[in-house]
Image (cartoon, rainbow, N blue to C red):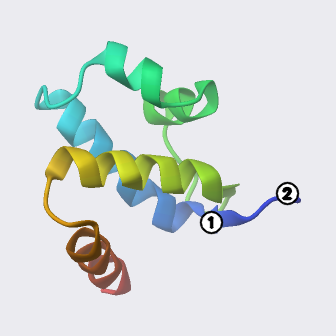
Amino acid sequence: MDEPAIKGSIFASVIRDLRELTDAGRISQEDLQERLSPLEQKLLESGINAAAWYPMESYARITDLLCELQGGRPTEYFRGRGSANAR
């Protein structure tokens, strides 16, 4: 992969969080189709391989969406997400 990438073990957490919000009705399938690329939509359905690498652009787009859906200030959201990933 020639573009910046993130390890699947980290990327899996944002996919899980987005699935939870989708299942809870916080975002519709139509909104997901508008906001996510076809690759990201496929990853949301099929899952993540913890050992694989995924586009950083996709990780950034999904974390931005999660931040928006979960409210709060971006600094707090991303600090909390980093802390959780470090554990």
Q: Residue at x 25, y 19 (%)?
A: 28
Which of 81 and 74 lies nearest the eye of the viewer?
A: 74
Query: In the image, residue 7 lies at what x, y percent?
Result: 61, 67
Find residue 82 and report its image quarter. bottom left
Categorize mark 1 by other alpha carbons within 10 Å: few (<14), some (14-19), many (20+).
some
Categorize mark 2 by other alpha carbons within 10 Å: few (<14), some (14-19), many (20+).
few
The kind of residue tagged 2 is: Met
Quadrant location, the N terminus? bottom right
Query: In the image, residue 25 lies at what x, y percent?
Result: 13, 25
Q: Which mark is residue 6?
A: 1
Q: Earlier in the sequence, mark 1 or mark 2?
A: 2
Q: Residue at x 11, y 31 (%)?
A: 24
> From the viewer's perspective, is 60 left or right of 81?
right
Placement of 71 over or under 23, stated as above or below? below
> From the viewer's perspective, is 51 left or right of 1?
left
Find residue 12 and report its image quarter. bottom left
Query: In the image, residue 43 lies at what x, y percent?
Result: 53, 36
List the residue tagged with mark 2.
Answer: 1
Q: Residue at x 53, y 47 (%)?
A: 48
